[in-house]
Amino acid sequence: LAAQHADAIFTHHDTLEQAQDFYQDVKRQLVEQGREPDDLRIFQGVSVIVGDDDADVERQYQETARLVSIENALNYLGRYFEHYDFSRHPL
């Protein structure tokens, strides 16, 4: 759908390889839809943790990871879809 109509999409991937694969796939789909590869902009989301050293960054990351549960994430996502209950679906 994005390859047919969108001017921009926002995405997030955990690795550079995943992001590059996604980028190439979207650009291929654009051409298949008769569009130019530059007709659509892809914005990659990033999360940045700033710390005093690698150990501090890792500590902050682990602390944040402990605070975020699947249930809370699904509830947060549901707010953007008229409070849809995404927990009904298997993960």
Image: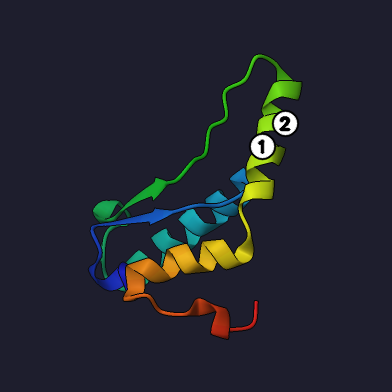
For this orientation, the residue located farthest to the top is: 52
Q: What residue type is labelled 2?
A: Glu
Residue occupying the point 40% across, 79% down = 84
Dot 2 alpha-carbon crowd within 10 angstroms: few under 14, some 14 to 19, many 20 or more: some
Left or right: 26, with 81 as reference point: right
Which residue is pictured at 47% across the width and 80% down the height?
85
Name the residue rendered at 70%, 22% in the picture.
56
As drawn, 74 above or below 15: below
Residue identified by numbered label 1: 61
Quadrant assignment for the C terminus: bottom right
Q: Is residue 28 visible?
A: yes
Q: Name the residue under label 2.
A: 58
Circle 1: element type: helix
In-front residue for pair 76/36: 76
- Residue 55 percent coordinates (x, y): 76, 23
Tag 1: residue type?
Answer: Tyr
| Residue lying farthest to the right in this orientation | 55
Name the secondary structure under disc 2.
helix
Q: What residue is drawn where x is 27% and y is 58%?
A: 36
Q: Which colour scheme is used?
A: rainbow
Tell me if residue 3 comes above or below residue 55 in the rendering: below
Q: Is residue 87 above or below residue 15?
A: below
Image coordinates of residue 64 in percent, x first then y, are 63, 42
Whether 70 is drawn above or below 82: the answer is above
Q: Quadrant of residue 10?
A: bottom left
Residue 45, horizontal then vertical, whole percent: 45, 45
